[in-house]
C-alpha cells in the first residue's frame, strides 16, 4: 500500500523548496512523486516546426524523492509520518502522531 498517493497534500522536508506545501499530481515510480509548484526548473526547449512546438525557456515540474516529502496533517499544521493499520478488515493509512485515519473527518 502506498503511503503517499496522488491527490495528497504534502510538505517538503529538505532542499530548495523546504517548508512549502503542494498537492501530489503524479507518482512517477515507487520512489518519486511530482508535486504541484515544487521543484520547478527552467528547461531550454528547441523549436520543432514539424510538431508545431515553439522553442524557448519553459518551466517544468521535476520529480522529487518521496523521502523528501511528508503528508501534511491539518490538525497539527505540520508534516507527519504515515503508518498502515488494519481497521474493520481493511488496510487504512493513519497519522503516526495521533493514530487517526488519513482523510477522516473529525
Image: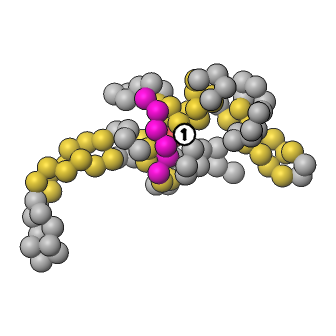
The image shows residue 40, relative to residue 48, as above or below, that is: above
- The answer to whether 23 appears left or right of 2 in the picture is left
Q: Is residue 54 visible?
A: yes
Q: Quadrant of the C terminus?
A: top right
Residue extending farthest right: 88
Q: Which image quarter: residue 103? A: top right
Residue 58 screen position, x and y as percent: 19, 51
The image shows residue 102, relative to residue 77, as above or below, that is: below
Magenta region's main secondary structure? strand
Q: Which residues are magenta?
A: 20-25
Label 1: state its secondary structure: strand
Residue extending farthest front: 106
- Number of numbered discs present? 1
Residue 94 screen position, x and y as percent: 74, 37
Give the residue at mark 1: 9
The image shows residue 28, relative to residue 15, as above or below, that is: below
Residue 56 screen position, x and y as percent: 10, 54
Residue at 10% of width from left, 59% of height from top? 55
Residue at 59% of width from left, 49% of height from top? 5
Residue at 46% of width from left, 33% of height from top? 21
User: Tag 1: Cα neighbours inside 10 Å, few (<14), some, or many (≥20)?
Assistant: many
Residue 50 screen position, x and y as percent: 12, 77
Q: Which image quarter: residue 37? A: top left
**Foreground residue, 31 or 43?**
43
Name the image colouring. secondary structure
Q: Is residue 67 visible?
A: no
- The answer to whether 96 appears left or right of 76 in the picture is right
The image shows residue 28, relative to residue 73, as above or below, that is: below
- The answer to whether 95 appears left or right of 63 in the picture is right
Q: Is residue 44 magenta?
A: no
Amino acid at each position: 500500500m502506498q503511503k503517499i498517493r496522488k491527490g495528497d497534500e504534502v510538505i517538503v522536508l529538505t532542499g530548495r523548496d523546504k517548508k512549502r506545501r503542494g498537492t501530489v499530481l503524479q507518482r512517477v515510480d515507487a520512489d518519486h512523486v511530482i508535486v504541484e509548484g515544487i521543484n520547478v526548473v527552467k528547461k531550454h526547449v528547441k523549436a520543432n516546426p514539424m510538431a508545431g512546438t515553439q522553442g524557448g525557456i519553459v518551466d517544468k515540474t521535476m520529480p522529487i524523492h518521496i523521502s523528501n516529502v511528508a503528508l501534511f496533517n491539518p490538525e497539527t499544521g505540520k508534516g507527519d509520518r504515515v503508518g498502515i493499520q488494519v481497521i474493520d478488515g481493511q488496510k487504512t493509512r493513519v497519522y503516526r502522531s495521533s493514530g487517526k485515519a488519513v482523510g477522516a473527518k473529525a
